[in-house]
Amino acid sequence: FSRGARRRAMAAYQTVKREAAHEDSVWGVVWTHDDKLISGSIDETVKVWKANDAAKLEETATFPGNFLGVVSLSASSDGKLCAVSSLDGRLRVLNLEDKVVQRTIDPGPVEAWTVCFHPDGRIIATGSQSGNVNLFAVAATGDKPEAVVSPHGKFVTAVAYSPDGRHLASGAIDGAVHLLNAESGTLIRKLEGHTKAIRSLSFAHDSKTLITASEDMTMMIHDVGAATASVATLTGHDSWVLAVAHSPAGGECVSGGSDKKVKVWDLHTRQCVKTFTDHTDQVWGVDYNAAGTKFISCGDDGALVVASKTIQ
C-alpha cells in the first residue's frame, strides 16, 4: 500500500440520513463548490440544502414546477446557477442566489434528458433521445440550441465536461462512450467495453481520467490521453451502476447502484474499500464536496445521505 492507499483503506465514515427529503424518488444530487447541496426529485421539486457542522441538512430553498419530475441536475462552477432537466421535456436554469427560475427552455420531447454545465458556466450540454448532444448558451433566448453534436444515433443517457473544459464525454443507451473535443465537437475517440446503457460519467479533477458507469454492473477507468482501451474495470455492484463521482482530492471515487448500495473505491488498488447500505432502494446520484472529505447520495427511497470521512 502507498501512504495514500493506506489512508483510504483506514478511513472511517459517519453518515447522517435525511429521511423523506422529498416525497418521491430523488434522481439527482449536486454538491456545489460553494458548499450548497441540491437535490431533484420525481415529486417535481428541486431543493437547496445547507449542511451544518454535524452534517445535518437544513432546507434553504425549494423550486417547484419541474413537471412530471426531475431527471438530471448540474451546477455551474461558481455555484450560482443550476441546470435542471425534467420529464416534461423542459430545461430550466435556476438562479440559486436570487432563488428564481432564470430561464426555461423547451427544446422538444426528450431533447434534454441529461445535463451538464461547461466549467466556464456559459454552455449547458444536454443528451437527447435522438442521439444528439445539444449545446445551449446560458445567456441566449429562445428554445433552440447554439450547436448540435451527433456522436451516437442512440439515446444519450449521460454527458460530462472535463474540469479543464477541453473534453466532452457522452454515453449512450447501447453502452458506447464518445470522447469529443468540447470546442469543435469533433470525435476524438470512441471508448468501448460496456455492453449495456451508460448511466453516469465522471472526469477526474485533473481531467486525465474518465470513469464510466453502466447497467452492465461495471465501471471502467479510461485514460483520456491514450489512444487505446480502458485502464481498468471496477466490479462489485450486484446490479446496474447508476451514478459515479470522482473525489476532488484524487485517488478515489464513489458509486451508487440499483443494488441500493453506495461504494467507495480506491483508484490505485482498484478495489472497493467501503460499502454503505443506508438507502433502502436504488441509488441514483452521488457527489463529493469540494474538499473530497464528504459525499452525498440520493435514491428512490426519497432520502439523502451525507457521509463524512474521519481517519482512524
Image (cartoon, grey):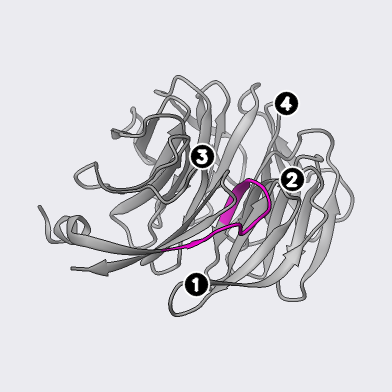
Label whose residue precedes the other's in the sequence (1 or 3): 1
Q: Distance between the residues labelled 1 and 2?
A: 25 Å
Tell me whether circle 2 and circle 4 mark residues in contact (CB < 8 Å): no
* Mark sitting on residue 69: 2
Q: Give the range drawn in magenta.
A: 16-29
Amino acid carrying label 4: it is Ser
Q: Is label 1 or label 2 in front?
A: 1
Q: Quadrant of residue 272?
A: top left
Crowding near pointer 4: few (<14 within 10 Å), some, many (20+)?
Answer: some
Given residues 208 and 91, the one toward you in this image is: 91
Label whose residue precedes the other's in the sequence (1 or 4): 1
Q: Is label 4 or label 3 in front?
A: 3
Please name the residue that numbered disc 4 is placed on.
Answer: 130
What residue is rendered at 74% in x and 56% in y? 45
The residue tagged with tag 1: helix, strand or loop?
A: loop
* Mark sitting on residue 177: none
Please name the residue that numbered disc 1 is placed on.
Answer: 56
| Residue 290 on the magenta segment | no
* Mark sitting on residue 282: 3
Q: In which quarter of the image is residue 114?
A: top right
Label whose residue precedes the other's in the sequence (1 or 2): 1
What residue is rendered at 50% in x and 72% in y? 56
x then y, percent, for residue 259: 43, 35
